């Protein structure tokens, strides 16, 4: 629902922020509850990371060549 309401350009800017919050909480809070909270934020980041990039490519470049676009993106990620 966030992709439809907010849009991929806005989500692409900040979809890595839950990871940053989760890792900061994990490093700063030495309790089990802190670790659980950190894992919640990291899980939100994983959910966003699974959907936002694919929707971004499809929205900006169309769905006709989505396989080729995703394969190039994966190759760049592996190379990096």
Image (cartoon, rainbow, N blue to C red):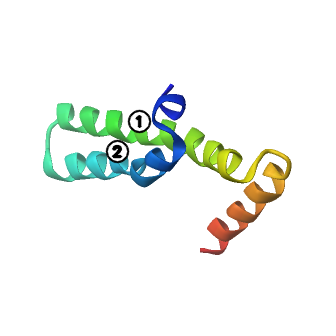
The quarter of the rendered structure image containing the C terminus is bottom right
Q: From what the image shows, is residue 27 above or below residue 45?
A: below
> In the rendered view, does 47 fall on the left or right side of 71?
left
- Toward the viewer: 4 or 80? 4
- Toward the viewer: 37 or 3? 3
Q: Which quadrant of the structure image shows residue 75?
A: bottom right
Q: Which label number is shown at residue 18?
A: 2
Residue 48 is situated, as x and y percent measured from the top left of the image, at 49, 40
- Secondary structure of residue under mark 1: helix
> In the rendered view, does 56 fall on the left or right side of 15?
right
Q: From what the image shows, is residue 7 above or below residue 61?
A: above
Q: Which label number is shown at residue 2?
A: none
Residue 29 is situated, as x and y percent measured from the top left of the image, at 14, 44
Q: Which residue is mark 1?
A: 44
- Secondary structure of residue under mark 2: helix
Tell whether label 1 touches label 2 (CB within 8 Å).
Answer: yes
Q: Residue at x 31, y 53 (%)?
A: 20
Give the crowd class for mark 1: few <14, some 14-19, many >=20 residues within 10 Å: some
Q: Earlier in the sequence, mark 2 or mark 1?
A: 2
Q: CA distance from mark 2 to mark 1?
A: 6 Å
> In the rendered view, does 17 fall on the left or right side of 32?
right
Name, please, the residue furthest toward the top. 1
Name, please, the residue furthest toward the right. 64
Q: Residue at x 23, y 52 (%)?
A: 24
Q: Residue at x 14, y 44 (%)?
A: 30
């Amino acid at each position: 629902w966030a992709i439809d309401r907010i849009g991929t350009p806005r989500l692409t800017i900040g979809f890595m922020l839950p990871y940053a919050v989760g890792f900061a909480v994990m490093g700063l809070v030495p309790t089990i509850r802190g670790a659980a909270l950190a894992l919640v934020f990291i899980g939100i980041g994983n959910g966003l990371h699974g959907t936002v990039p694919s929707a971004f490519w499809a929205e900006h470049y169309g769905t006709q060549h989505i396989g080729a676009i995703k394969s190039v993106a994966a190759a760049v990620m592996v190379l990096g």
